[in-house]
Amino acid sequence: MPDTATATAVRAPALELRGIRAGYGRLTVLHDVDLLVPAGKVVALLGPNGAGKTTTLSVASGRLAASGGHLHVGGQHVNGASAAALARAGVCRIPEGRGIFPTLTVSENLKLVSFLGRRADGVADQAYERFPKLRERRGQLAGTLSGGEQQMLAMARALGTDPGLLLLDEISMGLAPKVVADLYEVVGQLAATGISVLVVEQFVHTALAIADYAALMVQGRIVRMGEPADVQDALQATYLGGSAR
Amino acid sequence: MSTFVALTIVGLVSGCIYALTATGLVVTYTTAGVFNFAQGAMGMVAAFTFWQCWQGWGLPLWLSLLLVVGVAAPLFGLLVERVLFRRAAGAPPDQTLATTLALLLILLGFAFSVWPVKDPRILPRYAGSGSVTFLGITLSATQLLIIASTVAIAVLLRLLFSRTRLGLAMRAVVDDPDLLAMNGLEPARVQQLAWALSSTLAALSGVLLAPLVQLNVLNLTLLVVNGYAAAMVGRLRSLPVTAIGALGLGLAGSWSIGYLPDLSFVPQWFQATLQQGLPMLLLFVVLIVMRPDPLRAGAPRLNRPPRIPSARRAAVSGAGFVVAAAVFAAAAPGSWLDTGSRALVLAFCGLSLVLLTGYSGQVSLCTLSFVGIGSYAMGKVGGLGGVLVAVAATALVGALVALPTLRLRGLYLALATFAFGEVVDIGFFGHYFGASGTLRVDRIPVPGGGAGYFVFCAAVFAAGSVALLAVRRSRFGRRLAAMDDSPAASATLGMRLSRVKLGVFMVAAGTAGLGGALFGGLGAGIVSATDFATLQSCVLLLLLRIGGIKTVTGAFVAAVVTAVLPVVQQQVPSLGGLAYAVTGLGALTLAYAPGGLGGFLAELPRPHVPRVRWVVHA
């Protein structure tokens, strides 16, 4: 475990979940989740299907209200804050699937980012610079882009807004390895600028390569958290059956 | 100026009104996912409020316009979103449909009680009798105003959606409300603005339409409803196509009034149906022709359907019900018995909705049309033969409605049945029930006078209920429940959805037809077409939902309320529109108890009586 005492003394953790319970209707998915993303660090959230990883991100981004426990973002208690309010406060979530508006054009998608308080052209310039493909396709409907281009467009929101906390949900899903590598290079660059990142990823090694810490989640609970090397054994033992790639 | 040009102008003017309504519909449907059945009623109330400000209180015209269209209408839109639809985000379409129907009825009830029908109200034409002549074409000031405002609105909306960040957000919320929140914008706020915009458009269409027609609550509501067809032409998505559809609809309506009478080979009643029912016919046709949505596996529903009583329990309760009815018949005064019989007949008709909508999930807004057709058959044939003809005829008509609509579900099916009901109102009841709108229908011969018929109706309802519950427990009933839960899953299991749907439609229509035959002899043997109006079908459906649409209790409760409320209203005439308002307000409780009263009762804990079989060892 990181030395939390000194970490808080310097800078409050970017995200802290304390005893979080959450679910959908009568179904409880998260039972007593404790999770910490120290400021400026990358944490990989790993676990089998249905463990509650996406639900954890939903709670952290304000999409889903926790039915119990405490949610802290940047040291502030933010239980009950809406997803939009948290987004404006600097929590940037790139959702599972494709985080784009398919019936809007690429440039219109980027323009919407300006509701986060950034100038629209600044966001677009930054996105086009990092992903030149997007500039070529700026007048095209986002839904007609390839999967990789759509994910680049989704990542452009993280690039252009300088968030405090980045929540990534399986951004590699359904993409070619080369595109995945490219996207994770961007994630690495963002992390290097001091942005805290919580990443959910099915390619364990890809995620662990950039992660400072890893948390293993099983059946709605965090069962292990620590340095990637510490978690690796537990990973293989608990759910991957030794077949992590 | 030639007749053609004059007709074209009239058509364009009504097309403009349709376009305004339809645009409002599309805006709320795309941004908030709600098809607002109350759009017409909102326009109607706006027109009346406008009359109140301008003519009633004598405010200047500009101030009245500003107050109604600029202030009251947007505020009302905000209120509707906040109170009725914020909680229902992501609710199944039939629930939001019920909510908008409830809003429609509340507004009707409100209008009927605030502006009683007996005092006539006339809205003068704007700018008096002024007119403008341009290129030899003369337009009245009102016509010019309507066309100019519609063009202005179209341009403004175009600018809003293509140039502004807000318009962009309104388009984005259609795609993905959650993602919009991740961009820092509250989706609910955007949807609220969409409601305000839509309400303003409704008010504008009502205010512009009112001087052209008389200020009549139902007429005004239904005229605006005609815009639905235009919205459907644009597939509830495209505003330009919607506008084209609206103008086409207006022109077709106007030309049909001008030129159809020249075609002497077209029978008179058919001409009348075409002229008045054109928008609804078009709505029906568009729905049938439209490419249907693909079958999708729905999200699992977490609320459990109510328990189905066992055969024994049903039989015992049924027998008890008949005995209770016999005691009531012996004790109650004669005037109560007619109302009571009416309630029982309606309850029997309600059973057809329990089967069709409750068990099978097929929303129908035209149940009473079948009842009316059954009544007509009974009136023409009479006796027991009349009952048989009524059942056979309605089952056949049910099949005719079901066949083209087999692939429609949810909202689209509801709209198709609504359109069918309206067409039947205009073309069938309007013609065959004569100018008075009434028909003499005699009772089937039952001994014992009014009391005897009352007990007979109770027995028929009880038998129908027992049979319905038996159907629900049967193989066919399980198929219906499966189809309601997930058409996609049922299809993958090899179930032929079209056969099951056709079957259930025919049985439900036949049941309604039988109910129609039983109407004979009620109210001194005169049945009235207004009892079978599509709007009444909507009321019945809502009451059933309140009573619990998956239960026999629901049918009974709905029928008693339907039969008793008009009697109450007769006693207290000041409560105009009471039935509408009560139904509408009651339907709002559905947000809290989706199963209705029947669902609530069926879930009450029962005393647990252990059955122990002692095994005695020798």
Image (tube, helix red, strand yellow):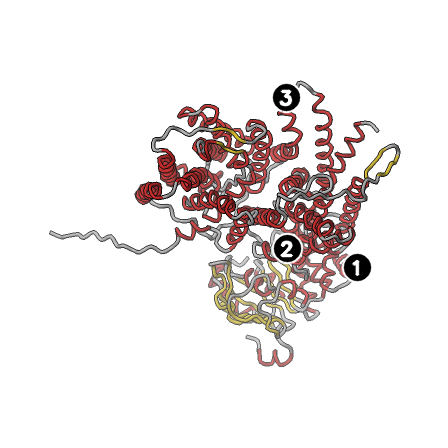
SS category of the residue bearing label 2: helix
Q: Tell me the number on the disc at residue B177.
A: 2
- Please state which amino acid type lies under the numbered disc 1: Asp
Precedes in sequence: disc 2 or disc 3: 2
Nearer to the camera, B119 or B27: B119
Q: Please determine whether, in this image, residue B183 is positioned above or below residue B298.
A: below
In the image, taking residue B425 as reference, residue B14 lies left or right, namely right
**What kind of residue is marked 2?**
Pro
* Callout 3: chain: B
Q: CA distance from mark 3 to mark 1?
A: 65 Å
- Which residue position holds label 1? A121
Q: Are marks 1 and 2 on the same chain?
A: no
| Residue at mark 1 to residue at mark 2: CA–CA distance | 23 Å
Tell me the residue at 57%/78% (across/down). A4
Q: Are marks 1 and 2 in contact (CB under 8 Å)?
A: no
Secondary structure beneath label 3 = loop
Q: Nearer the viewer, residue B8 or B531?
A: B531
Residue beneath label 3, please? B267
Residue at the outermost top position = B265
Residue A17: % across, % down: 55, 70
- Residue A230 is situated, as x and y percent measured from the top left of the image, at 53, 70
* Of B376 and B611, the residue lying toward us: B376
Which picture quadrant has residue B339? top left
Residue B436 in percent (x, y) is at 57, 30
User: What amino acid type should be assigned to the residue bearing mark 3?
Assistant: Pro
Q: Closest to the observer: A165 or B124? A: B124
Q: CA distance from mark 2 to mark 3?
A: 52 Å
